[in-house]
Amino acid sequence: MPTYSELHPAPIGSTIALLARRIRERFPGSGLSQVASELVQVAERNQVAIEHLRRPLWWVRALTALTIIVLIALVLWAVTELRSVVRGGSVTIAEVLQSIDAATSELIFLSLAVLFLVSLETRLKRRTALRMLHRLRSIAHVVDMHQLTKDPEHVLSSVPATASSPKRTLTRDQLPRYLDYCSELLALTSKLAALHAQHLYDPVVLASVNDIEALTADLSRKIWQKISILAAAKPDHQPAMASELDKETAG
């Protein structure tokens, strides 16, 4: 039964795929459409990684349990041997202390091995999660690069271009849509990152997810400032733009 208190990878992936089609239909051959297609592939790999992270690593747990059993058996053996030696009275105190020192060294070594194995599963899953989160952070920066030169002033007024000016082909009607697509890509990138924080209670992973959420929120805020400038300069086009957005969402 589906739950509505947590994110699910499949619907997020479907939403990204739909957004990629919308961008491709609106801006065919654009760099933003290629970024969206790349995000679709990353979402698929992210879903596989999430499913892998939710499954326990049984070989690590079995090895940990075996080490704990050996540790307990060694403690029982050491106690039994010590009791038999003390009762027999055939050894000196120096030999008893030497035996205790050797047993203590073995116990310390096995205890460290248990601690290592107990944290091994978390560290392996952390490495997998951080690898995916690094990819998502990179995509967020790529999206920001695509909107970086999309300034409202160049469509609201005539700004003389220089020899080094970037090529601007978006019209006054296309620019708000392009920026809105950038904002949606950032929001969905953030949701892909948030999936890792639902079932992996690791402080390092949680901190990385929070960093990506803060990054995408800041970048999206810059984009919406541009959209607000365009909306304030052209209020009569807002109903038509909203109606078009509703049609795309319904489609």
Image: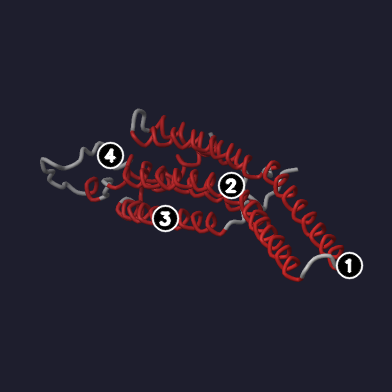
230 on left or right of 201: left
Question: SS at mark 1?
Answer: helix
Q: Quick one: label 3 or label 2, which is nearer the N terminus?
A: 2
Label at residue 125: 2
C-alpha distance separating marks 3 and 4:
28 Å
Report which residue position mark 4 lands on.
Answer: 171
**Amino acid on which disc 3 is placed:** Leu
Q: Quick one: label 3 or label 1, which is nearer the N terminus?
A: 1
**Whole-percent x, y for residue 136 in the image:** 45, 45
Label 2 close to label 4 by CB (< 8 Å): no
**Whole-percent x, y for residue 178 in the image:** 36, 41
192 on left or right of 102: left
The residue most toward the left is 163
Q: Nearer the viewer, residue 27 or 51?
A: 51
Quadrant holding the N terminus: top right
Question: SS at mark 2?
Answer: helix
Report which residue position mark 1 lands on.
Answer: 87
Report which residue position mark 3 lands on.
Answer: 215
Crowding near pointer 1: few (<14 within 10 Å), some, many (20+)?
few
**Amino acid on which disc 4 is placed:** Thr
**Amino acid on which disc 2 is placed:** Lys
For discs 3 and 1, the disc positioned in front in the rendered view: 1
Question: SS at mark 4?
Answer: loop
The residue most toward the right is 87
Label 4 close to label 1 by CB (< 8 Å): no
Crowding near pointer 4: few (<14 within 10 Å), some, many (20+)?
few
Question: SS at mark 3?
Answer: helix
Q: Quick one: label 4 or label 1, which is nearer the N terminus?
A: 1
In the rendered view, would you say 98 is above or below 43?
Answer: below
Crowding near pointer 2: few (<14 within 10 Å), some, many (20+)?
many
**Whole-percent x, y for residue 195 in the image:** 58, 48
Q: Quadrant of residue 145?
A: top left
